[in-house]
């Protein structure tokens, strides 16, 4: 649970005013959902992909045919994964060492108090779950799980399977890591859940996302097309900023903690 922060004006005055407006929108909503991206986990020490210091900005994007490479020789792919786990790269080391930050805890607490109904995250790090979020769809998968490509069943990924490539105990289908690769379709159950939640939503809180990756970003635009409000919390302006009723450009952890405090005060007032 996120700790209550005293409402001291640590943010610029304009940001404090925007937090007030964002809280009012959340409190007025009947079914608010969140869309989160790499920016919310950056304060946990996990590098972002895009932007000035993003991994892909510095090192280039991964090959766009990742899934094709997996499907062409899954046994070789799993053998390569074993070697990568023995010599993890910068991102893997950072995710393994990461813990939820104030932003993750604030999102979980907004769900607990009944204001946020669902979280769609583009992150695969599992930090929302670790912070306590229950109603969540990890649209790009979760690095801590394995997934059957035929029936979408998942189970924790603790140790490398002995038999390679692994097969699903339920249906015999081919199993891969749950993380969605370039060139791979979004899992059917995850995409269906995102669509259903977005259709119900009358407000979306976007935290730490550039809102450029489809299909996740499409849900925000769909909500906006129905004239419902968008609230953005991101370090820098994005392509969607000018379409948001409130856009707060400051560190996500601090903004979300302040937003949580303001929402909880509003809930107490309503009582």
Image (cartoon, rainbow, N blue to C red):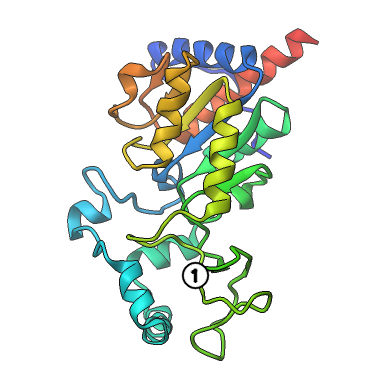
Q: Is residue 240 left or right of residue 265?
A: left
Q: What's the residue at 53%, 12% (across, down)? A: 20
Residue 154 seen from this side: yes
Q: Is residue 121 left or right of residue 91?
A: right
> Which is more toward the observer, 120 or 23?
120
Q: Out of 185 and 59, give the one closest to the viewer.
A: 185
Residue depicted at x 18% and y 55%: 58
- Residue 35 in percent (x, y) is at 49, 36
Picture residue at 45% right of the left edge, 13% below the top? 18
Residue at left offset 68%, top offset 45%: 134
40 is higher (above) or lower (below) than 99: above
Which of the pair 24/72 is nearer the observer?
72
Reading the image, the residue beneath label 1 is: 177
Secondary element at tag 1: strand
Instruction: Give the image location of residue 156, x and y in percent.
Output: 63, 69
Give coordinates of residue 11: x percent, y percent: 43, 20
The residue at the far right in this view is: 271
């Amino acid at each position: 649970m996120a700790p209550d922060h005293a409402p001291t004006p640590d943010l610029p005055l304009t940001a404090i005013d925007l937090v007030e407006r964002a809280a009012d929108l959340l409190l007025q909503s009947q079914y608010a959902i969140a869309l989160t991206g790499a920016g919310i986990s950056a304060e946990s020490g996990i590098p972002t992909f895009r932007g000035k210091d993003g991994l892909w900005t510095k090192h280039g994007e991964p090959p766009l045919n990742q899934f094709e490479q997996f499907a062409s020789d899954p046994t070789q792919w799993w053998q390569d994964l074993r070697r990568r786990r023995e010599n993890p790269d910068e991102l893997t080391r950072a995710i393994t060492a990461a813990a939820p930050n104030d932003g993750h805890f604030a999102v979980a607490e907004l769900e607990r108090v009944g204001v946020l109904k669902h979280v769609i995250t583009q992150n695969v790090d599992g930090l929302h779950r670790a912070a306590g979020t229950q109603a969540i769809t990890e649209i790009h998968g979760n690095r801590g799980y394995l997934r059957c490509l035929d029936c979408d069943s998942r189970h924790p990924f603790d140790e490398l399977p002995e038999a390679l490539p692994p097969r699903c105990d339920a249906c015999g289908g081919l199993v891969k890591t749950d993380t969605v690769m370039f060139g791979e379709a979004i899992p059917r159950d995850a995409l269906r859940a995102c669509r259903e939640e977005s259709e119900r939503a009358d407000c979306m809180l976007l935290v730490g996302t550039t809102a450029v990756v489809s299909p996740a970003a499409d849900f925000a635009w769909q909500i906006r097309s129905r004239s419902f409000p968008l609230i953005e919390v991101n370090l820098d302006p994005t392509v969607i900023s000018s379409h948001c009723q409130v856009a707060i450009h400051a560190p996500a952890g601090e903004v979300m903690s302040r937003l949580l405090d303001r929402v909880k005060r509003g809930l107490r007032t309503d009582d």
